Amino acid sequence: MELSLDNGESFISNDSPFLVSFRDIVSEITDTTYSTHSVYYYPAKFIPHVVRFCINTYTRENDWMLDPFAGSGTVGLESYLCKRNSVLMDLNPLLKEIIEVKIYRGKEEPCYHRLYDILSSFNLSSAPKFYPQYSNIRYWYLDEIFEVLASYWGWLKTLESSIYSKIIQASLIKASRYFSLAEHKIPKLFRSKSKTRFIYELIKQDWQKKLKSMIHDISFKNFNNILDFFQRTKGFNVNVFCFSGVDSSTFLPALEQGIDCVITSPPYLQAQEYIRTFKLDLYWLGYTEADIKAISSLEIPYRKATRIIETETINKVKSQISRKNLLQYFDSYFCHIINALENVSKLLKTGGYLCIFTGNPKADNIEIPIWKILKEYFSEKKFETVNIFEDRIKTRQLFRSRKNKNPEGIKSEFLIVLKKIQEI
C-alpha cells in the first residue's frame, strides 16, 4: 500500500520497517496529554499520534474501531474526537472508571460552581470512613494519613454518581497514591526507602492542607480538560462500548455491526503486571482481595499457554533461550496475545485493518521482534501485510532507583498494519 505523508514523501512498506516519526507526521497533536488523556495515570500509554495516524489513514468517519488491550482508553478517546465509534476491552476493571471521565457524553455542560460546591462540602470531622477490604492496606500508609484518606473516600461514596464525583474520584486516586508509601512514579506496587523518607518529611508539614489542595487542584484541572472535550465534541453522535474486567482472548461482545479497524498496543512481553500496578486504586474503589486475586490470575505472567505458537522467528528466538521458566513465559505471552488478536479479528470485516503497535523488548539480552512474529503468524491466517513502520523513541523515563535488566530501554517501537483478506 502506498501512502503519502504531509511533506509529500511517498513510501511503500510491506516487508521491512519504514522509519517514521509519528509525532512529526501527526503534527496537529502537539502534546501527548492534550484533552482528557492525562486524567488517569497509566504506564506505557499508547501515544495518541499513532492512534490518530491509524484512524486518519485506514478508516473513515462513522467507522467502528476496537481495542482489545484498551488500557487508558487512548483508542476510544481519539476515535471519539475523530467521529469514529469504538469498542474497548481490557482485563483491568479501572477502564470503566477511566472512560466515564475521559469520554464525557453528558448532555449538560459541566458547571465549575457545581464542582466547587461539592468539593467544599467535605467535612473531615463528620465524614463517614471507608476502609478497603485489603488485609495489607496499612502497610502502604502511615496511620494518620490512612485515616484521613478513609474519610475522603467514605465521603466520596456518599455522593451521587455524576461527572463531578468521577472527577473527584480520579483526583483522589492520584492523591491516595501520592500520600502512600508506594512509589507514585514507578509502575507496579513498590515501596522504597526514598519514598518512605519523603512521607516522613511530609507529615512534619501541614500535610492535610497539601492533601486538600492536591485534590482540589487536580479536580479543577481535570474539569477544564473535560469542559474542553465537551465543547469540542458538542453535537457528536458517536458510540463508545466499554467492557472492563474481561479477558480479551475469550470474551467477544455481541455487536450488531462489524469492526472496520482494530487498533491496539498489547503489553510488551515482561511488562505485564497492570493489575498489581493498580491494586491500591482498585481496593479504594471497593474491589476485594478475592476480586483482585481472580483478575490477577488472568494476567499473562500467571497463565499457562494453552497452545504453542510457532513461526520461523519465534522458533529461532526460543532456540537461544536456555531458562525453562523464561521459555514457559515466552510461550504464555504469545499464546494469549495472539489468542486475543485472533478472537477480536472474528469481528473484523473482510478488508478491515489490524493495526498493532509494539516494541522489541529483550529477554535475557535477546531482542524479541514481536512485530515480525505477528507478521509471520497472521500471514498464514488470511491476513496480508500492508505497512510496517519503525518509530524511534526520543524520550524515555527510566527508573534509576531500581535494577533494570535492559537499562537502555526499547529504542524503537513498531506499527504493523495487516489487512483481513478472508474470513477466519
Image (tube, rainbow, N blue to C red):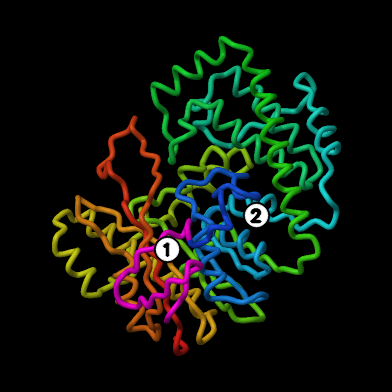
Q: Give the residues drawn in magenta, as a range.
A: 1-24
Residue 145 image label:
none
Depth check, front residue: 197 or 243: 197
- For the image, the number of numbered tags is 2
Q: Amino acid at mark 1?
A: Phe
Q: Distance between the Cα atoms at labels 1 and 2?
A: 21 Å
184, above or below 75, in the image = above
204, above or below 60, in the image = above
Q: The N terminus lies in which quarter of the figure?
A: bottom left
Q: Amino acid at mark 2?
A: Ile
Measuring from the top left, give residue 97's x and y in whole percent: 65, 50
Mark 1 or 2: the one toward you: 1
37, above or below 150, in the image = below
* Residue that protrudes farthest toward the top in the picture: 204
Measuring from the top left, give residue 111's x and y in whole percent: 84, 43
Q: The C terminus lies in which quarter of the figure?
A: bottom left
| Element on which disc 1 rests | strand
Q: Quadrant of residue 104?
A: bottom right
Q: Earlier in the sequence, mark 1 or mark 2?
A: 2
Residue in view at x 23 percent, y 57 percent:
367
Residue in view at x 57 percent, y 55 percent:
29
Depth check, front residue: 423 or 369: 369
Q: Which residue is mark 1?
A: 357
Relative placement, left or right, of 156 versus 371 is right
Measuring from the top left, give residue 360's x and y in whole percent: 30, 58
Q: Quadrant of residue 358?
A: bottom left
Residue in view at x 65 percent, y 36 percent:
171
Residue in view at x 36 percent, y 36 percent:
399
Q: Which residue is mark 2?
A: 99
Measuring from the top left, give residue 178's x and y in whole percent: 55, 29
Neighbour tally class for label 2: few under 14, some 14-19, many 20 plus, Cα within 10 Å = many
